[in-house]
Amino acid sequence: MSSKISRRSLARYAADQLLGGSSAKSVARHLAAALISSRSQKDGPLLLDDINYELQNRGYLASVTVTSARPLSASSKNQIASLVKKLAQVRQVILAEQIDKAVIGGVRIQTADRTWDKTVSTELNKLKENI
């Protein structure tokens, strides 16, 4: 019978190993083995979110998703990365861009534990609620 290890424990282990210099490939193998042995393979995506949260809270890395109506310029991406680095107090930022025409304009910036939503669609919804 296998015992289940909590995702948070696995995330802390992964962050400890990565920050201690272990290769991502080695850490991934250990995590995969733990998920398989505890029959928790479906928790893989949630575990990645927990690892991102752990790395961000330790001031190391923020994985950021930026949603906008149109592709951002390199300059805008750099400005957003600098802003997130300062606000999240991390050393590094990895930025993924998502295009969603429904936001109309502006940007939504999401990290492991925060969201800054300055999209036109959100502002319009707020306006509707107040009317």
Image (cartoon, rainbow, N blue to C red):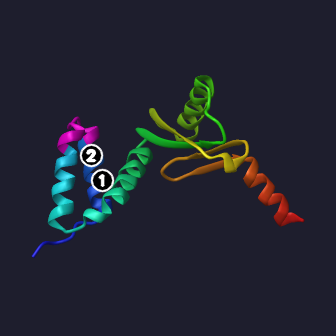
Q: Residue at x 17, y 42 (%)?
A: 26
Q: Tell me: residue 102, above or below residue 129.
A: above
Q: Is residue 112 left or right of residue 75?
A: left
Residue 22: image quadrant is top left
Q: Residue furthest top?
A: 75
Residue 108: percent from left, percent from top: 63, 46
Front residue of 105 and 65: 105
Q: Residue at x 21, y 53 (%)?
A: 31
Distance of label 1 from label 2 (alpha carbons): 6 Å
Label 1 packing within 10 angstroms: few (<14), some (14-19), many (20+): some
**Marker disc for residue 12:** 1
Label 2 packing within 10 angstroms: few (<14), some (14-19), many (20+): some
Q: Which residue is mark 2?
A: 16
Q: Residue furthest bottom?
A: 1
Residue 62: percent from left, percent from top: 46, 41
Residue 24: percent from left, percent from top: 24, 39
- Which range of residues does the magenta coloring cover? 18-26
Q: Secondary structure at mark 1?
A: helix
Q: Tell me: residue 104, above or below residue 82.
A: below
Q: Give the residue type at disc 1.
A: Arg
